[in-house]
Amino acid sequence: MTSDLALPRYGPVYRAFGVVVAVWMAVVFCFGILGPVSNLPILEHTARNLYFHVPMWFVLYAGAIAGAWHSARLLATGRAINDVRAESAWTISMAAGLAAIITGVVWSRYTWYQGTGIWWSPEPRPNMVAVQLLIGGAYFVLRGSVDEPRRRARLAAVYALFATATMPFLTYVLPRRMASLHPGAEGNPAFSQMDIAPQMRWIFYAASAGFLMLAWWMYTQRVRSRVAEIRAERLGESAPAPVAVVS
Amino acid sequence: MLQTAPSADTTIALFDTSAAQALTVQSESPSERAMLAENKLPVVLAVVLIVWAALMLLALRTDRRLARIERALDAHDSSSR
């Protein structure tokens, strides 16, 4: 294998990890759907969405941080594998962000905005995250607009670093400075004793860990398939040109 | 043994509400007792778990396919060197 695309060996341990993730999340679904739930007004049973909506934000963050890390590594070393890893992490991150914002819209529409017909509100967090998703989406536009691989890798890496730098401000600092439906707007930690039943907390932690593991698994699949694709393309380049057949 | 629930013609139940009643008033089977508790949420769970199992089987099969492709590429690289 060419050294700039070296991957760790994904052997039996990796495959067992996939099974663990599948079973782990199945257990989370069992507890999440049937388990105890705090009986808050307006939210009622939709409080269960805590297990599925909020971990998407964690995946968004984790993916962006991993993408930024590999972007920085690419700028430092110029190894193609870091470009592949950065793009894969960024893809997972943006997919999770999209899922998070859509689930948030659906959730709020049928709880806080029930009877108002409001789908999109001046709620600061989804608005700021929409801005962040546009910034993140431009990463793919940028990649699509440059054909030369090394140039594309370096440009995308620089852009990803800037895009990640805006993330904590847009999605964490600013929403907490404004009135919001989301917990923590008063400047307190994300949830207090009042918000959720104590048993929910453990299901939530398990769900977050499960979704992060799932994201890592999907990320490695993308990395591996992209690396295989590049290697196959290089085979085509190094092979002698096919002999023209004259009939 | 006497069958308590006669095999009913469901086409009649569509038109005759009393026949539909007769269909639904059978005694609950054990699986029904489990699945219809708590606002029928266990049914949701069953559907979610089936979808999840299908997705994870696909993901695991993708893993195996990737491993095969990687082995083929490795073999090609080592033979051409």
Image (cartoon, helix red, strand yellow):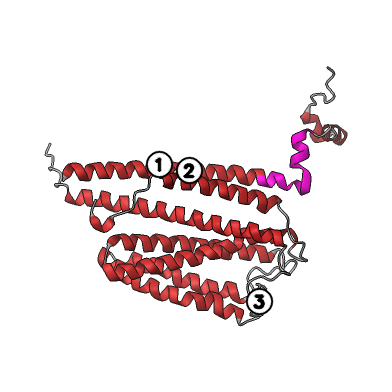
Q: Quadrant of residue B34?
A: top right
Which residue in the protein does label 3 denote?
Answer: A180
Find numbered disc 2 in the image and state the secondary structure of the residue it sits on: helix
Give the residue type at disc 1: Arg
Image: A221 above or below A101? above
**1 vs 2, front mark:** 1
Give the residue type at disc 3: Ser
Mark 1 to mark 3 CA distance (whole Å) = 46 Å
Q: Is residue A148 visible?
A: no
Find numbered disc 1 in the image and state the secondary structure of the residue it sits on: helix
Tell me the subunit letter for badge 2.
Answer: B
Quadrant showing the C terminus of chain A: top left
| Of the image marks 1 and 2, the number of the one nearer the N terminus | 2
For the point 52% across and 45% down, which residue is it?
B55
Question: Magenta segment, principal secondary structure?
Answer: helix
Q: Which residues are magenta?
A: B29-45
Give the residue type at disc 2: Leu
Mark 3 to mark 2 CA distance (whole Å) = 40 Å
